[in-house]
Structure formats: structure tokens, C-alpha cells
Image: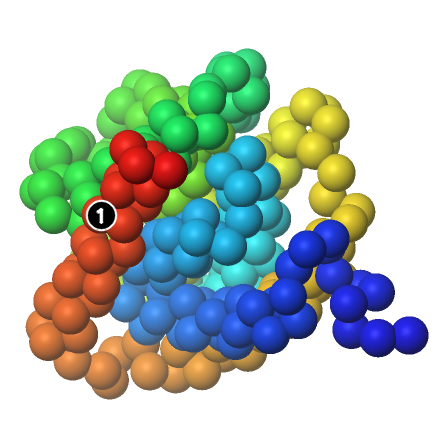
Amino acid sequence: MSLTDFLPPDLDPTLALALVGLSLVTSLITATFSLGGGTLMLVVLALAFPPAVVVPLHGAIQLGSNAGRAVVQRHHIQWSYVRWIALGAVIGTIVGGQFAKLLPEQLFTALIGLFVLISTWLPQPKIVGRSPLVQVLGGGIISALSMLVGATGPLVAVFLKAIPDRQQLVATHATLMTIQNTFKVLVFVALGFAFASYLPLLVAMIVSGFIGTSIGSRLLVKVPEVAFRWGFKLILSLVALDLLRSAIWP
């Protein structure tokens, strides 16, 4: 029995190992800087898999990664922010799931590329995060979008800007993303996505992601951000532009 017996069809073993390593790195990034790792994972998955596979796999991987981060940082979770956004997430994932299979593959790829560019470079709107109505509506809209474009962590963070403590922000954000991705995976299962053939890869990526989370949580208040964030934005933008190119000139 070889490694290929545990992998999805046509997935190169070297690429599979690279994805497992990437899961560690992206979880470390997110645990350290609150954001970024999920978007990086999204763009790499979009280069490695067909567009229709990307969002379901991304949701399952991020479910494991965020759950691990929420467990590690559980004492810092601000539950007052969680309940209303989670309610909106239930509604949003169901609504967004109705449209997830209707998009042509090229449009799907272009949407991912555009979303990465927008969430990377445009300033985030100022929103009163403590309003229950705003949180429910925001949770619903963001979760619906997540069924189409995958990584909506930067948008969820908009509603948490009022949290002054960095550890509380990371813990609360991880909890909300865990809830959102749980609903997302359940909806894709109901829609008939075959997670079983990807299960060994997903388990390996979730385990490596937990290791990255454990390391990143220790670096959370120690690592300077400015130079890293600029370089990271440039890398994300280059990959997003390549996704747009592949959508326009397949």
C-alpha cells in the first residue's frame, strides 16, 4: 500500500505533502496575526484543485484549524460577540449554498481572485459591532458569501474591531469561523459533496494545522507585523492576479 492509495485521484503525493506543510504555516500565521492564513490557503487550493472542489475543502480545513485555535485560546473567547453572528451564519450558509453549484468554473475562479484583492487592499468599513441586528445581518451576509468565495475571515473581523485585547480578538474570531465552517461543511454534505475521498488528506492537514496553531499562539504578542504584512499582501495579490488571468485566459 502506497501514499497514493490514501489520496484523491490525480493528486500528486509531493503536492499533498506540500499542502500538509502549508496547513501548518497558514495556521501559524492566523494564530499569530489573527488573519491571513485562511486566504493564503484558499488561493493555493485554487491553484491545486478544480474550482468546484476548492470551497468545500477550504471549509473543512478551516473548520479544523479554527477549532484548534478556539480550543487553545478558549479562555479569551468573548461570547457576547458570538451568539448573534452565529445566528446569522446559520441562515447565510443555507441561502448561499443554493447558489454554490450554479456558478460557472471560470466565474468561480474570477470571484476568488477578485475577493482576495478586495479583502487584501480595500479599507474595511467601520461597523458598530455590538448591535445585535447588525451582527445577525452581517453574519448572514458573510456566511452566504463564504459559500461562494471561501475565505471571509477578514470580513468577520470587521465586526470584532471593538475588542481591544489581541488574544480575545483571535479567540473570538476563531470561534466564529469554527461555527461558520461547521455550517458550511454540513451544507456541502447535504448538497452531495464527496468529502470521503479527501478524508486522509484533510485529517493530515488539520493535525499539522493544530501544530501551527500551538506555535503561533505563543508568538501572538511577540512578532512585529509591519514588514510581514506588506510582503504578505504582495504575495496574495500576485496569486490573485494569476487566478484572474487563468479565468480570463484558461
Q: Is residue 165 visible?
A: no
Instruction: Give the quarter of the image for residue 238.
Output: bottom left
Secondary-structure class at tag 1: helix
Relative placement, left or right, of 147 versus 230 is right
Q: Quadrant of residue 67?
A: bottom right
Q: Nearer the viewer, residue 201 or 32?
A: 201
Picture mark count: 1
**Residue 171 visible:** yes
Circle 1 residues within 10 Å: few <14, some 14–19, many ≥20: some
Type of the residue with mark 1? Leu
Residue 59 in the image: x percent, y percent?
Answer: 54, 45
Q: With respect to residue 174, does 83 lie above or below?
A: above
Name the spot of residue 222 as percent of width and height, x first: 24, 84
Q: Position of residue 65 (x, y in %)?
A: 53, 61
- In the image, 133: left or right of 217? left
- Horizontally, is 122 left or right of 85 in the view? left
Percent across and percent down for residue 110 are: 31, 33
Query: Which residue has dot 1 on it?
Result: 241
Residue pushed farthest right?
Answer: 1
